[in-house]
Image: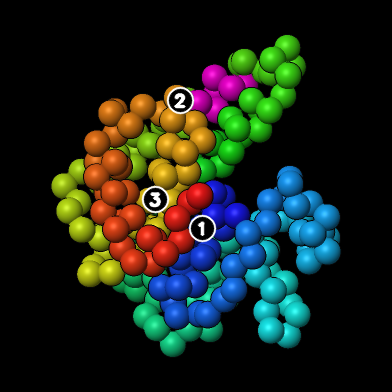
């Protein structure tokens, strides 16, 4: 489902790379049996290729797409820019992961929650967004040129996901650069075509 940051980043990347696909919106919870019939791992995202090969994990799907597409890469080629992009992607993926961990911990009964662990995860989530906020200071367009890069996609998708599921943990008012950057990204046709709900 597109409310997953991993599914959404893969889908947006496929569109930007010109890889046609059919999206099936299946919940790993509500549609477990239907998902399991496609992929016994029940892991999202899952990309089923025309020959039946299954790829799981957004980064692996994106890597396959990058090597299949005849469009320009979503990653900068210049070594210093590529290193920066990888760093930013890592921060955004960490923010997504920490947001997911908070959601799952909140699914547990109140008396079973580990508040010390939640405090640590919230700290990690804020650390990731603090670093991204600083990186976006002064950015008025895309990070690496005239079109969205993988860093742009992953940052905007992670921010949107966090605001969708744990906005009470990350106050948007404290992150004006991320708010503005993500709002610009969501106006792009390939983002708008794949909304997170």
Residue 31 place in picture, x, y as percent: 75, 52
Q: Is residue 196 above or below residue 126?
A: below
140 part of magenta stretch: no
Please give left or right for residue 60 compared with residue 19 in the image: right
Residue 102 place in picture, x, y as percent: 58, 30
Instruction: Decide: few, some or many residues near mark 2? Use Cα within 10 Å; few <14, some 14-19, many ≥20.
Output: some
Mark 1 or 3: in front is 1
Residue at point 44%, 30% (across, down)? 167
Please give left or right for residue 68 compared with residue 37 in the image: left
Query: Is residue 45 visible to us here?
Result: yes
Query: Is residue 82 visible to us here?
Result: no
Please give left or right for residue 192 compared with residue 43 in the image: left
SS for tag 2? loop
Q: Which residue is mark 2?
A: 169
Q: Which residue is mark 3?
A: 155
Residue at point 83%, 64% (across, down)? 37
The range drawn in magenta is 117-122
Residues 123 and 160: in front is: 160
Give the CA separation, mark 3 to mark 2: 17 Å
Residue at point 45%, 73% (across, down)? 15
Residue 150 place in picture, x, y as percent: 41, 63
What secondary structure is the magenta-colored segment mainly?
A: helix
């Amino acid at each position: 489902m597109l409310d997953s940051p991993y599914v959404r980043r893969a889908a947006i990347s496929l569109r930007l790379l010109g890889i046609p696909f059919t999206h099936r919106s299946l919940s790993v919870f509500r549609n477990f049996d239907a998902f399991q019939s496609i992929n016994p791992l029940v892991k999202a995202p899952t990309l089923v290729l025309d020959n039946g090969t299954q790829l799981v994990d957004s980064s692996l799907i994106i890597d396959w797409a990058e090597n299949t597409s005849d469009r320009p890469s979503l990653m900068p080629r210049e070594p210093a820019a590529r290193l920066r992009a990888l760093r930013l992607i890592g921060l955004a993926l960490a923010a997504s992961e920490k947001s997911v961990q908070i959601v799952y911990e909140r699914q547990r009964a109140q008396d079973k929650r580990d508040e010390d662990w939640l405090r640590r995860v919230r700290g990690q989530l804020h650390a990731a967004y603090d670093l991204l906020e600083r990186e976006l200071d002064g950015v008025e367009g895309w990070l690496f040129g005239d079109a969205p890069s993988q860093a742009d996609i992953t940052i905007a998708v992670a921010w949107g996901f966090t605001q969708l599921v744990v906005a009470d943990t990350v106050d948007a008012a404290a992150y004006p650069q991320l708010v503005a950057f993500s709002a610009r990204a969501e106006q792009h046709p390939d983002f708008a075509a794949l909304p997170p709900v």
